[in-house]
Amino acid sequence: MNVEEMIGKAGIQTCQSCIDSLYGRLSELKFLLLATTDGFEVAAAGDISQDDYSRMSAMASSLLSLSQAIVKDAELPACQDVIVDGVDGKILVLAVPGQQPDLLLMGVGNAQSALGGLIFNLRATAQEIRAALSVLNTTDAVVVNEHFVKPSLASV
Amino acid sequence: MAGNEHKLIVSGCIGAGKTTAISQLSKIRVVSTEAQNNDIQNSSKAQTTVAMDYGELSLDNGDRLRLYGTPGQKRFDYMWKVMAPGSLGVILLLDNQRKQVLEELQEYLAVFQSFIQEQRMVIGVVRSNEYHYPSVGDYYAYLRSVQLQAPVFSIDARRRSDIVLLINALLSQIEMKIKLQARSVS
């Protein structure tokens, strides 16, 4: 089963729209990617080649999973985000809650990126993806001209 | 007095029983990093290892073995290279149910080339009681054709005694090599 079978074409387009929207808003992002928690790429935006996209998706899944394991061993309630503080940039990986298949979101910020901004914006985008895919799953959404339109009763 | 510590890698294809094998042996709670498996074409398992498994085992002489299980899918092959350095040896698990098992063996031999050349690898084949080809003889024939040697065992990864057999075979090989090298020096 591939990603398109799992999420659907509309789902992938929706995810891509959310990713593109965040990448367009946050100038300090080098790239963003959305992947399944077992390392398959779903959507990406920014300065990243296809080879890097595939490899980074797999690496992000390893990083998130290892972090969840260490959080569990440390008897903390849950792993919210994984933060890698690089010399000229930052990497943030977080799980997109409540989706099937399980998804993760990874953002790589440049040297000017502020950690707080990355965390806030990626968490918001994760929630947006979750809400958008949930609506698609309940077939309440209307997709017009390949842009996702939220139904009026959906929570914002 | 604490003994020495050694690192062993348990690698192989998805579904071959790496996580199970480490769970069978480990004296500590195994660290596992599993995620929902979406690669249904490759394996019907619900969960798959995406970073590593970790377990520990004590030997009779007081030494401790640290067991590191690698993810099976090729997209995680960077983990094989991350985990291999400093390892005493590799236990390679293969699944006879898989149609391309000899091709997969070829890939693993390339990744762990130095281990097999230094006689620090053993191969365990699972599900050979249900899927008879390749036979253990076929595996040996393939290894001969590429001028490599490693013990090959037909095993059940759920059976502790079978995993112990693999470890003992690997440690015996390594010990023999060390003794031969010592003899040639003296």
Image (cartoon, rainbow, N blue to C red):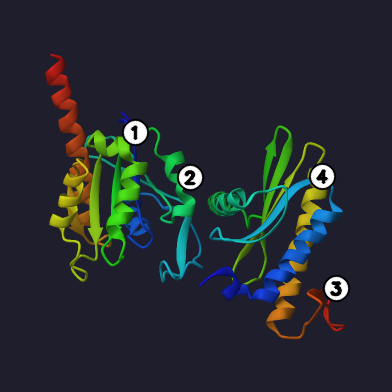
- Disc 4 element: loop
Same subunit, labels 2 and 4: the answer reads no
Between marks 3 and 1 in the image, the one whose residue lies nearer the viewer:
3
Tell which of B168 and A89 is nearer to you: A89
Is the residue marked by circle 3 packed among few (<14), some (14-19), or many (20+) residues within 10 Å? few
Please tell me which of labels 4 and 3 falls first in the chain: 4
* Quarter that holds the N terminus of chain B: top left
Tell which of B158 and B62 is nearer to you: B158
Residue type indicated by callout 2: Tyr
Q: Chain of mark 2?
A: B
Residue type indicated by callout 1: Glu
Q: Position of residue A31 (x, y in %)?
A: 73, 49
| Residue A125 can be seen in this image | yes
Task: Please give the residue where the numbered disc 3 appears in the rendered image.
Answer: A156
Q: Chain of mark 3?
A: A
Q: Position of residue A53 (x, y in %)?
A: 62, 52
Find residue A14 and name its label: none
Task: Please give the residue where the numbered disc 1 appears in the rendered image.
Answer: B5
Between marks 4 and 1 in the image, the one whose residue lies nearer the viewer:
4
Task: Please give the residue where the numbered disc 4 appears in the rendered image.
Answer: A28
**Residue at 54 percent of width and 70 percent of height:** A2
Discs 4, 1 touching: Cβ within 8 Å: no
Residue type indicated by callout 4: Glu
* Quarter that holds the C terminus of chain B: top left
Residue B45 falls left or right of residue A139: left
Q: Tell me the quarter of the picture where residue A25 sits.
A: bottom right
Q: Chain of mark 1?
A: B
Task: Please give the residue where the numbered disc 2 appears in the rendered image.
Answer: B78
- Disc 1 element: strand
Same subunit, labels 4 and 1: the answer reads no
How many tags in the picture?
A: 4
Q: Position of residue B87 (x, y in %)?
A: 35, 36
